[in-house]
Amino acid sequence: MRSFLEEAPPREDIAALIQEARWAPSGGNRQPWAVVAISPGRTRALLDRWQARLWTWVLPSYVGLLAERRPEMSESELWSFAQDRVAQAGSVTGHPWLLLVHQVGGGEQSRHHLENTPTARRSADFEARIERAVQLTEDVGRCSVGLFAHHLHLGAAARGWGSCLQWQWVMLQEELEQEGVLPSGLALRCGVVVGHALAHPKVPEREAVQVSWVD
Ligand SMILES: Cc1cc2nc3c(=O)[nH]c(=O)nc-3n(C[C@H](O)[C@H](O)[C@H](O)COP(=O)(O)O)c2cc1C
């Protein structure tokens, strides 16, 4: 959903939406998320300034993602497919809010505690497990932030609004810091544009999920 009306929901409704999303599940109930909420006017200005350029940066990784799914396509087919998709659905119109979601805490905190585990409690392969445990903690945190973002979508849908989850904003973090939109050094994970829907696009097709059954 990327087409929004000119009129956006009021700030107090967006504040309520964000607070509802706290009910997202998180690993260890750590709730490792926080939001920078950017007003519709400022969001529109950011989109006007960056949107087209952003896609030229994001396109190579989009082509990479497509290539994974469509090994039969040649390099030039992949690029034109990606460019078509961007032309059709790549730009946000109207005046949504932009909710930039960042991660709070992470794997490195658990490293500290793991490394300080008393020797008596360490298993034989303890050292080897530290890296895996740190990585796992980081992954669980990222997954939890994704669930939080999805709860923003659920809340938006419940209100009859439209929303789109966009990782592309992470590419723009440095510029957003320079413009004073973001403080420096946040673990930015994604943006959610949310507002009154002008038009809902056709839902893209889905492939059947591969399932392995084990008896
Ligand atoms: C992790 C993630 C990252 C995404 N990043 C972007 C993005 O940067 N820009 C964008 O326009 N859409 C983005 N999307 C939206 C997807 O393009 C969209 O969910 C997908 O095409 C399926 O469409 P649907 O959600 O309408 O069914 C993202 C979705 C997910 C789950």
Image (tube, rainbow, N blue to C red):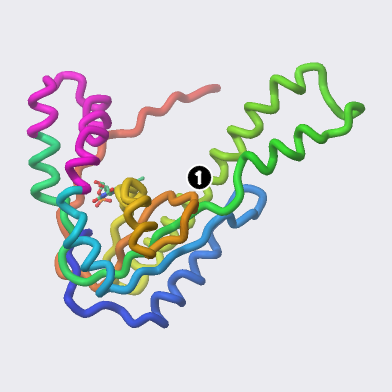
Q: Residue at x 9, y 49 (%)?
A: 88
Label 1 within 8 A of ligand 1 by Cβ: no
Q: Is residue 148 above or below residue 71?
A: below
Circle 1 packing at 10 Å, graded few (<14), some (14-19), many (20+), is some
Q: Residue at x 47, y 55 (%)?
A: 184
Relative placement, left or right, of 21 versus 40 is right
- Queried whether the magenta region covers residue 7, the answer comes back as no
Q: Amino acid at mark 1?
A: Cys
- Queried whether the magenta region covers residue 62, the answer comes back as yes
Give the farthest residue toward the front: 178
The answer to which of 5 and 185 lies nearer the viewer is: 185
Q: Residue at x 82, y 22 (%)?
A: 123
Q: Count the marks.
A: 1
Q: Measuring from the top left, give residue 112's x and y in whole percent.
A: 73, 39
**Label 1 secondary element:** helix
- Which quadrant of the view contains residue 206? top left
The answer to which of 57 and 110 lies nearer the viewer is: 57
- Which quadrant of the view contains residue 160? bottom left
Relative placement, left or right, of 38 versus 129 is left
Query: From which residue to which does the magenta span run?
Result: 54-80
Q: Measuring from the top left, give residue 109's x and y in whole percent.
A: 67, 43
Q: Is residue 187 above or below residue 93?
A: above
Q: Measuring from the top left, give residue 179's x and y in whole percent.
A: 33, 62
Quadrant, the N terminus: bottom left
Q: Measuring from the top left, give residue 212's x and y in whole percent.
A: 44, 24
- Which residue position holds label 1? 143
Relative placement, left or right, of 150 versus 87 is right
What secondary structure do most residues of the magenta stretch adopt?
helix
Q: Residue at x 20, y 42 (%)?
A: 205
The answer to which of 194 and 119 lies nearer the viewer is: 119
Quadrant, the C terminus: top right
- Which quadrant of the view contains residue 180? bottom left
